[in-house]
Image (cartoon, grey):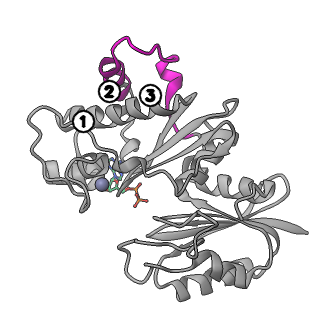
Amino acid sequence: MEYYGSIEAGGTKFVCAVADEELKIVERISIPTTTPEATLTQVDAFFGAYQLKALGVGSFGPIEVNRQSSTYGYITSTPKPGWKNVNLLGALKERYDIPIAWTTDVNAAAYGEMHLGAGKKTQSCIYLTVGTGIGGGAVVNGNVLQGFSHPEMGHISVQRYKNDGLESTCPYHDNCLEGLAAGPALEKRTGVKGQLLEIDHDVWEIEAFYLAQALMNYTLVLSPEKIILGGGVMKQTHLFPKIRESLQQQLGSYVSLPNLENYVVGCDLGDNSGTMGCLLLAKEQRGLE
Ligand code: ADP
Ligand code: ZN
């Protein structure tokens, strides 16, 4: 039997999975991200037991997605030791002589959620993860959105919440969403990790303000049918109503949004958004290889 393979290549772990023709996952494994060589050796050992038809890869980045570039398929300027300028797609192509779909982890998650999860029945969705960093992917009219590169939705500039003097945790930008609202920013604001904060802490209003401001901007630029929020910080489900309310407030009455409860939603596929997206890209061979 032939299978589809998926690699969700993260900075902390590589989640690999194999699925059948119906995209039912047959086996899934989590491999710690160490050096490229050691990590790929373990990836090989996992896929070795299967005959693969195609592989979908959603990678942490930034990555090169422009086929015209001499570094197409590379992980480019990551601060992760050992992974800067690594030709990940090339290394996989050497190992597996099959079609390989190549995109960002968040684009893969957006694709998975749109087709099989929270975005079913839509054609245009945004997926945003709020965790160690903030990253967004978009599917527009059924296709993953890429241009000269991939979107970097976590690094948009935001206006500061009144009197917010936090020093941005992003080394590149003083006023970007990630630097003011990702997990490390939450921790810097409060002195404790987000998962330990009480739900009535004042910081959640600030957090909701920044996320809503970002959602407003994505809404105005892309007009998606749905925005799906995932990542560790969004396990704080009380944030959803706060974000919806702030989004409505910041937009004013300028754009009439779809029903907010259906517009700003959580993931349906849990930890499998990226994996399912990679599998589907592999199955459909969506021209990304
Ligand atoms: P990663 O982004 O590394 O893949 P996560 O999405 O779990 O992993 O993000 C980790 C970040 O999210 C950390 O900064 C952590 O403190 C924060 N975080 C994880 N779980 C929660 C939670 N339940 N509530 C708030 N913050 C959380
Ligand atoms: Zn930034």
Percent from the top left, x then y, of residue 233?
36, 46
Residue at the image position 39 percent from the left and 33 percent from the top: 217
Residue 238 visible in the current orientation: no
Is label 1 within 8 A of ligand 1 (CB to nearest ligand atom)? no
Compared to 138, does 25 lie above or below? below
Q: Tell me the number on the disc at residue 242.
A: 2
Is label 3 within 8 A of ligand 2 (CB to nearest ligand atom)? no
Percent from the top left, x then y, of residue 284?
80, 53
> Disc 2 and disc 3: Cα gap in Å?
20 Å
| Residues rendered magenta in the picture | 242-267
First of labels 2, 3 by sequence position: 3
Please state which amino acid type lies under the numbered disc 3: Leu
First of labels 2, 1 by sequence position: 1
Per the image, is 67 magenta? no
Q: Residue beneath label 1, please?
A: 204
Q: Residue beneath label 3, please?
A: 220
Query: Decide: marks 2, 1 in contact (CB < 8 A)?
Result: yes
Per the image, is 247 magenta? yes
Query: Decide: marks 2, 3 in contact (CB < 8 A)?
Result: no
